[in-house]
Amino acid sequence: MEHDARIYVAGTYTPIGAALLRVLVAQGYGNVVGAKDGGPDLTDAAQVEAFFERTRPEYVFLPGGQSGGIRANQKYPALLMRDNLLVECNVIHSAYLHGVQKLLYLASSCCYPRDCPTPMRVDSLLTGRLEPTSEAYALAKIAGIGLCQAYYQQYGVRCISGIPSDAFGPGDDFSPEDSHVVPGLIRKMHEAKSLRVESVDIWGTGGPRRELIFADDLADACIFVMHAYDDREPVNLGGGSDLSIREISVLIKDVVGYAGALRFDTSKPDGVPVKVLDSSTLLALGWRPKTPLRDAVQTTYEWFLTREEASMTAPGSRVSP
């Protein structure tokens, strides 16, 4: 992927997409198409087709599609499934029609069976039942992997798939209802600190383990595999930190500076017991994450604080005394 190549990041509204833009620019890739206006509505086939016709990207990163935490998956299964199916179908087909040299599609660790052996290996895909709380979303992401493989087989399009571990970073969704674990806990702890609340309730037992990766490190891994990986089989994009939800909560509590207690609500679902990836293929190619977990959480919290301050001081906002 030459530094003057036309590159399209399909889904800059996602934290991974935003991170890809940052890291591509930092690494000297100066011809990212659609970066200024965000590109087309990826669920609209006609808009996507017209965009590819006009910009003729040579390389495509596809992190697009809606996602969310356990609560969002329970509330919006149809929306999440439909959105992701439309996005992957539209972008991958337009990439084929317009001669894209290579496309990297980002799936999700939710694609793995709920009770598959850990660390999760790609040969465990489709070997068991999915986690019920995210099944609709996971099915759509699995379909994206299959679509890449089908276009590779039938048309020779170099469509590869990456399965990232749980990513977080600036630009994340910090909403109380729909966020993933790290941004959701950052908001909870920050608000509890600001309001001097004595305790914070956290869903589940605190026992499930998650592998976390900073969004900018994941973006770097995506650029790396665009250069170094060509197999039709998906590649795991992990190598980050493996912690329990309880350990993640304690770390975020410390970064935010919240002094209250953490209470785990065992009446709420845990989700998958362990989501840790076997990223030996990626690591054997020579890639490593660069950002220590605490630094990544600190950077994410600082971004959150900046956004909160901007929203409070914007015209029409009510500033607390």
Image: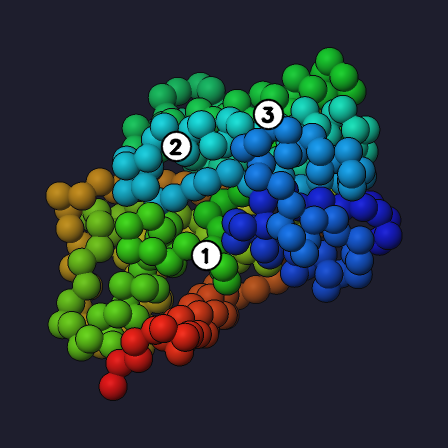
Q: Name the quadrant containing residue 103.
A: top right
Q: Which mark is residue 89?
A: 3
| Residue 79 tag number | 2
Give above or below for 253 relative to 204.
below
Residue that badge 1 annotates: 172
Q: Would you say residue 296 is visible in this rendering?
A: yes
The structure residue drawn at horizontal position 49% and vertical position 59%, both measured from the top left corner, is 171
Give the percent coordinates (x, y) of residue 22: 65, 60
From what the image shows, is residue 17 above or below residue 190?
A: above
Residue found at x 57% / y 31%? 44
Q: Amino acid at mark 3?
A: Cys
Q: CA distance from mark 2 to mark 3?
A: 15 Å
Quote the CA–CA distance across marks 1 and 3. Answer: 25 Å
Residue at the extreme top: 154
Q: Earlier in the sequence, mark 2 or mark 3?
A: 2
Q: Earlier in the sequence, mark 1 or mark 3?
A: 3
**Circle 3 — which element?**
helix
Per the image, label 2 sits on a secondary structure element best described as helix
Residue at 22% from the left image edge and 40% from the top image edge:
269
| C-alpha span from label 1 to label 2 | 19 Å
Q: Residues within 10 Å of mark 2 (few under 14, many from 20)?
A: some
- The quadrant the N terminus occupies is top right
Q: Residue furthest bottom?
A: 321
Q: Nearer the viewer, residue 72 or 321?
A: 321
